[in-house]
Amino acid sequence: MPLYETMLIARQDLSPAQVDELAAGYAKIITDGDGTVLKTDNWGLKTLGYRIQKNKKGHYVLFNFDTQSPALLEMERLMRLSEDVLRYISVKVDAFAVEEEEPETTDEKKEAA
Amino acid sequence: MSEERSTFFRRKKTCPFTGPNAPVIDWKDSKLLLRYISERGKIMPSRITYVSPKKQRELSKAIKRARFMALIPYVSDGGNR
């Protein structure tokens, strides 16, 4: 089934617990629509590049899904309705990058030079 | 003496994204994208960064997605990048 990568920004004044709950709720929609949630990655509170609806910071949550599009569209519809989600983006990907946080490549280049 | 140079202004004309251990362009990787936007937050032209046309297209799409998700600013006041 097609792989999707969805990221959402939740309002600043949500508690981390509420953000997890929100994320679990959306993940459930996907599992209901017989998709599978490969990864749920909570990046926590980060400062935004610019203010969105008066919020300077936002909770970032990243999902990796393997699902058909109806389930994803349903989830997006609910995100649109929800006031907690400031912004979301779903991207169809061919494969998920599995590698971990590899170190900055620039250091090796400097030593090699 | 090791000539100190950032990966940005590479003298030789190779694209930083082609080649064996080139970094993958990913819109979530703001650290990588910040190297390819100017002080003001504009996308650097490929004539300066020596990025190949194909990778430049991928890079600009990734930067636009990152901007939409507020990972990088649309316009930065030339300081707090």
Image (cartoon, coloured by chain):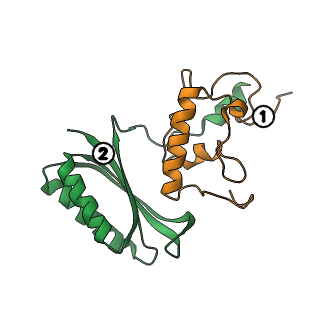
Chain colours: A green, B orange
Amino acid of disc 1: Arg
Residue at x 50% of width, y 43% of height: B62
Residue at x 59% of width, y 44% of height: B33
The reply, left or right, for residue B28 in relation to residue A81 is: right
The vertical placement of A98 against A62, above or below, is above
Seen as rendered, the residue at the extreme right is B1
Mark 1 touches mark 2? (CB < 8 Å):
no
The numbered dot on residue A4 is 2
Rendered location of residue A70, percent (x, y): 18, 51
The numbered dot on residue B5 is 1
In terms of depth relative to the viewer, which is nearer, A63 or B41? B41
Q: Chain of mark 1?
A: B
Q: Chain of mark 2?
A: A
Q: Secondary structure at mark 2?
A: strand
Tag 2: Cα neighbours inside 10 Å, few (<14), some, or many (≥20)? many
Seen as rendered, the residue at the extreme bottom is A13
In terms of depth relative to the viewer, which is nearer, A6 or B41? B41
Residue at x 53% of width, y 54% of height: B67
Rendered location of residue A95, percent (x, y): 34, 35
Amino acid of disc 2: Tyr
Rendered location of residue A81, percent (x, y): 29, 71
Q: Nearer the viewer, mark 1 or mark 2?
A: 2
Q: Where on the picture, by quarter, is residue B9?
A: top right
The reply, left or right, for residue B32 in relation to residue B81 is: left
